[in-house]
Image (cartoon, grey):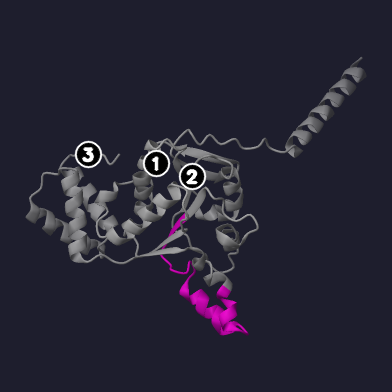
């Protein structure tokens, strides 16, 4: 009897292991994204999913000072896309902290509010992280048949030596057999105009048999963006305008002369003048004044 029980237990263990192995080998169920759950999502590559973002970290477009021309161009491009007209992928490049990613999020809010009033399926913002760029084709595959329109956004995009993931982006933007879905547009921010470091470009040129062709494939990635928007360091007047706009918006009780003096001292300790530095000063000021900052 004992031998029979042992044999039965061994058989059950074997069947359980076989079932576990078959479960691991079986394909995962197809992703069913609920794009009605929110106006913004974060793409996760493993396991594939769109994580809804119910409160987007952004500031109103009217608070982004010194960006009038860039804001006008990006809003116009996004409005055309939202209404089904031809529009370009956009690369926002340049100085750190000057509002590149803030402009993308503010632009989505500005145009999305108008689009929602027309009864359309909606304008969605989907963020993809730099390290997941290789999975961009799969991400777009899930959007292709949706009634929504999508801004796919990658913040701080750049590529280093021996990084081949840029090829996935090139194929999606223009060169692949499927191409970019009609209901998707791609916006990226970067500190580099050509999305790769200058020393990498120079090294490719110096060691290649044909220098011009050696870097063409990598440099041409930025050419896939039809709209280039450059961001440059703020002047003192622009920086102070940013600070004043924040102070007015949040009704901070501070004298104009004190605000100017403190803001300039703050920028000197940071060694920079930018929208980011202005916002950091305002947060410090609001904390000292025991005020909250609601940018929702």
Tell me if 48 is positioned left or right of 127 in this view.
right
x and y, in percent, of residue 132 in the image: 55, 52
Q: Earlier in the sequence, mark 2 or mark 3?
A: 2
Picture coordinates of residue 173 (x, y %)?
55, 59
Which residue lies most toward the top here? Answer: 1
CB-based contact (under 8 Å), mark 2 and mark 1: yes
Instruction: State how far apart marks 2 and 1 are (Cα).
Output: 10 Å
Instruction: Give the labeled residue for mark 2.
Output: 149
| Residue 15, position as x, y percentages in the image | 83, 28
Task: Classify 10 Å Cα crowding around label 3: few (below 14), some (14-19), many (20 and above).
Answer: few
Query: Which residues lie in the magenta part?
Result: 187-216
Image quarter (top left, top right, bottom left or bottom right) of the N terminus: top right
Local secondary structure at mark 3: loop
For label 2, the crowd category at 10 Å Cα-Cα, with few meaning under 14, some 14 to 19 and many 20 or more, is: many
For image coordinates 16% across by 61% down, the residue present is 264
Compared with 204, 175 (above or below) is: above
Task: Say how many tags the image has.
Answer: 3
Q: Are marks 2 and 3 in contact (CB under 8 Å)?
A: no
Identify the residue position indicated by label 1 in the image: 115
First in sequence, mark 1 or 3: give its number: 1
Viewer-closest of 132 and 120: 120
Residue 140: tell me if it is visible: yes
Mark 1, secondary structure of its residue: helix
Residue behind mark 3: 292
Crowd around label 1: few <14 · some 14–19 · many ≥20 (10 Å): some
Q: Residue at x 41, y 65 (%)?
A: 228
Left or right: 11 in relation to 145: right
> Mark 2 or mark 1, which has the lower sequence index?
1
């Amino acid at each position: 009897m004992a031998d029979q029980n042992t044999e039965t237990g061994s058989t059950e263990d074997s069947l359980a292991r076989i079932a576990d192995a078959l479960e691991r080998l079986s394909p995962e169920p197809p992703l069913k994204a609920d794009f009605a759950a929110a106006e913004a999502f974060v793409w996760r590559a493993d396991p594939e999913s769109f994580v809804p973002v119910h409160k987007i970290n952004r500031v109103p477009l009217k608070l982004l000072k010194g960006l009038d021309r860039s804001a006008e161009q990006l809003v116009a491009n996004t409005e055309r896309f939202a209404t089904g007209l031809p529009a370009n992928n956009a690369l926002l490049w340049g100085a750190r902290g000057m509002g590149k990613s803030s402009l993308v999020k503010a632009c989505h809010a500005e145009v999305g509010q108008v689009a929602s009033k027309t009864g359309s399926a909606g304008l969605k913002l989907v963020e993809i992280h730099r390290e997941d760029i290789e999975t961009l084709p799969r991400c777009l595959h899930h959007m292709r048949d949706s009634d929504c329109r999508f801004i796919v956004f990658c913040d701080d995009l750049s590529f280093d030596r021996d990084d081949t993931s840029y090829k996935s982006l090139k194929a999606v933007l223009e060169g692949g057999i499927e191409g970019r879905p009609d209901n998707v547009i791609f916006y990226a921010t970067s500190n580099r105009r050509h999305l790769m470091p200058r020393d990498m470009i120079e090294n490719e040129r110096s060691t290649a048999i044909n220098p011009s062709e050696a870097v063409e494939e990598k440099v041409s990635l930025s050419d896939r963006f039809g709209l280039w928007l450059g961001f440059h360091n703020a002047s003192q007047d622009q920086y102070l305008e940013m600070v004043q706009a924040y102070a007015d918006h949040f009704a901070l009780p501070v004298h104009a002369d004190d605000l100017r003096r403190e803001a300039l001292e703050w920028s000197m300790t940071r060694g920079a003048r930018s929208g980011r530095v202005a916002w950091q000063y305002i947060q410090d000021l609001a904390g000292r004044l025991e005020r909250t900052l609601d940018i929702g």
